[in-house]
Amino acid sequence: MRNWNGKPYHSLDYMLRETFGEKVYKVTLNGGMSCPNRDGKLGSRGCIFCSEGGSGDFAADAALTITEQIDSQIAVLSAKRPIHKYIAYFQAYTNTYAPVEYLRKIFTEAIHHPSVVALSIGTRPDCLGEDVLDLLTELNQIKPVWIELGLQTIHERTAAYIRRGYPLSVFETAVRNLRERGIEVIVHTILGLPGESEEDILATMEYLNHRDIQGIKLQLLHVLKGTDLAQEYLEGKFHVYEREEYLNLLIRCIEHLDPEIVIHRMTGDGPKELLLAPLWTGRKREVLNLLHHQMKVCDSWQGKQYNFDQVTVNGVNSNKQFHTLSE
C-alpha cells in the first residue's frame, strides 16, 4: 500500500506540511455576501441542500471586520495547540458575488494578515467575471490563492434537481480561466445525492481526473433542518447512507482518483443543531479511523484503480507520472 505520511491518500494535511513545513489550520470567514441562487437572480431558495448559513455555518460573524474574524479564530485555535500559520477561507455563500472593489478590500485585508499563508475562496463557477479573475491573479502574486468551486455532480439531471443553476460547460470554462492564470482549483462534490448510483458518482470522479484541478472535497450528503431537502427526506423520498455503505463508496472513489489530486475533505460534518441525517457523521474522528483501518485491511490507496495510460487534460495527453512515495 502506498502512503502519504501514514495515510493511504493524498491528504490536505500532507500537502500543507510539504508546502509550508508545518501544520496549517483554516480560519473560516464570512464576507457578508449572498448568492445568485438566493437573491432572485437565479432563484430565491438556494440549492436544495443549503441551509440559511449558505454552507458557511461554521464561518465567523460577518459583523466583524476580516481582521477581527481572523484574530478571534486564531485566539481560540492557538489556545489549544501551538499554531503559527493559517489559511484564510471565505466560506459562507458565494464569495466572488460582489463588486470587485469590495472583494479587493476584504481579500487584500485577509491575505496581508501576518499569520495567513494562503487565501481560499469558495464560490460558483458562474461568478468569476474578468474583473474578478484579474483581481485573483494579482492576489496570487502575493500569496497562494485557491478557488473552491461548488460542482457537486457532473450529471445534469441531478444538477437540475438540486437547483445548481449552471451547466457543466460553465464549470469547464471557469477551471480553464483560473488555470490559465496559475490559480489552483479545488472542487466540491457531494456523494449520495438523491437519484445517483455508485456508478454515477464514480463517473464524476473520472471526469475530474481529466480536468486540471489540484484538490477535491468529498462531501457526504447531509440533510439539514429547514432545507427543501429535509422535507423530501422526511417524506421518505430518498435514502441516506449508513456508515458502512458510505465507507465502501468512499474507498472506491479514492481508489479511482488521480493520486496527484489533494483530498481536502473526506466526509464533512453538519452543525449538530441542524443535522437531521445521517447522525453517525457527528462522530467524525471515529469515521476517519474506520476508513483508515478498512483501507489498510483492503490494501487500498488513492489511485489504485486509476488509469495512468489514458489521462488527458483539456484534450491533451498529460502523461502524468506518479510521485515517488514511501511504500
Image (cartoon, grey):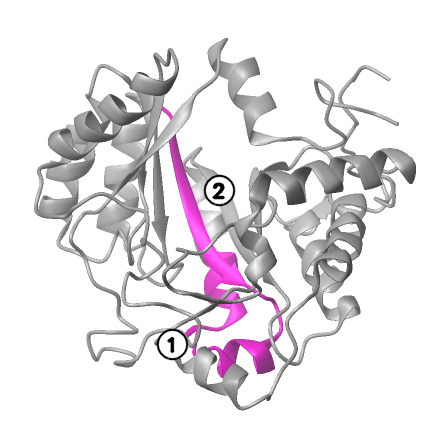
Q: Residue furthest toward the right?
A: 298
Name the kind of residue labelled 1 in the image. Answer: Thr
The span shown in magenta is 144-173
User: Can you give x and y, in whole percent of width and height, for residue 224 in the image?
Assistant: 43, 69
Residue 83 magenta: no
Does residue 258 appear in this view? Answer: no
Which residue is the site of mark 1? 227
Q: Is residue 28 left or right of residue 303?
A: left
Residue under the point 48% across and 16% down: 23
Which quadrant would the N terminus be assigned to in this image? top right
User: On screen, 226 above or below 262?
Assistant: below
Residue 153 magenta: yes
Which residue is the site of mark 2? 185
SS label for mark 2: strand
Q: Residue 5 or 291: which is nearer the viewer?
A: 291
User: On screen, 115 above or below 53?
Assistant: above
Name the kind of residue labelled 2 in the image. Answer: Val
Are the two marked residues, 2 and 1, in contact with CB atoms closer than 8 angstroms?
no
Q: How many marks?
A: 2
User: Can you give x and y, in whole percent of width and height, for residue 314 in the image?
Assistant: 63, 50
Q: Is residue 64 left or right of residue 152?
A: left
